[in-house]
Image (tube, helix red, strand yellow):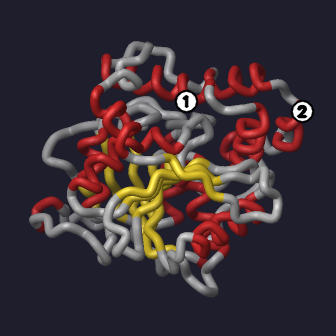
Amino acid sequence: MGEIKVSPDYNWFRSTVPLKKIIVDDDDSKIWSLYDAGPRSIRCPLIFLPPVSGTADVFFRQILALTGWGYRVIALQYPVYWDHLEFCDGFRKLLDHLQLDKVHLFGASLGGFLAQKFAEYTHKSPRVHSLILCNSFSDTSIFNQTWTANSFWLMPAFMLKKIVLGNFSSGPVDPVMADAIDFMVDRLESLGQSELASRLTLNCQNSYVEPHKIRDIPVTIMDVFDQSALSTEAKEEMYKLYPNARRAHLKTGGNFPYLCRSAEVNLYVQVSPMQEWTVGLPSTFLSNSPHRSLRPITALTTPWLYA
């Protein structure tokens, strides 16, 4: 059993923060699962969107730390949606249900892509205040899987899990990163066939972000210098797409830095452009480089293809 699942922090989180189930679609089989923690008086919270293999609780370390500093944090788990427009419409209904006019979005891998698509979807009536894109991408064609996207729904669960696990890091990693991988494997095992198939479909379905529609939204690009699912070319494409974005670089962290390098990730979240409720931090945390790269005091550390 992974160390994270039996850790005091995780058990404290599960015992104190309730998991809520919300239906906003006419189809009552589409259930959003979420943790909502922190002051309800904050009407522009930070919402975390997980990768293909993730559930809402993969962000438990962000919830514990950031709510402890007075932030409102919501971590989500998606219902089964088969295309990006359907997801965006469902997410909009969820925000309406929660009475949230605007939000900050932190998306990991697929979650980051969906966050960008939602910002694009609502550009005429903006709902997104800022974006933090962790190991994310802007064009699904980088995976060279668009031709298989419409066949995932036919595959059995064990095959879908094998596809995802095949992209997890298999080389030597430090114990903290190994625990993060074990925890994500456990979370992956908890997902059903339709959940996995729909997420892989969203991950690979032919689509790209239209940057001109979200150019006014502050963006932070968070990535790692060690092995991750994203190629160097994919990272460079993100930098080109958002030339004015802040860059939050982690020395290490692999596919899941929010689990294994949570202190650095939490720091970057605090210094990202979230004007509504950013805690005052010394300006020395921010560099004056042309790309406004953010550097934490200590080096810390990432996902990829289907992570």
Is 152 situated left or right of 51 in this image?
right
Q: Is residue 256 above or below residue 139?
A: above
Residue 124 seen anywhere in this rendered image of the structure: yes
Which residue is found at the position 55% from the left and 76% from the top? 214
Local packing at callout 1 (Cα closer than 10 Å; few below 14, some 14-19, many 20+) is some
* Disc 2 element: helix
The reply to whether the C-beta atoms of the residues labelled 2 and 1 are less than 8 Å apart is: no
- On the image, numbered disc 2 is attached to which residue? 154
Which residue is found at the position 41% from the left and 63% from the top? 46
Residue 111: x, y in percent? 56, 51
- Taking depth in this image into account, of 247 and 88 the one nearest to the observer is 88
Q: Quadrant of residue 54?
A: top right
Give the total of numbered labels: 2
Q: Which mark is residue 187?
A: 1
Which residue is found at the position 23% from the left and 54% from the top? 68
Which residue is found at the position 63% from the left and 58% from the top? 22
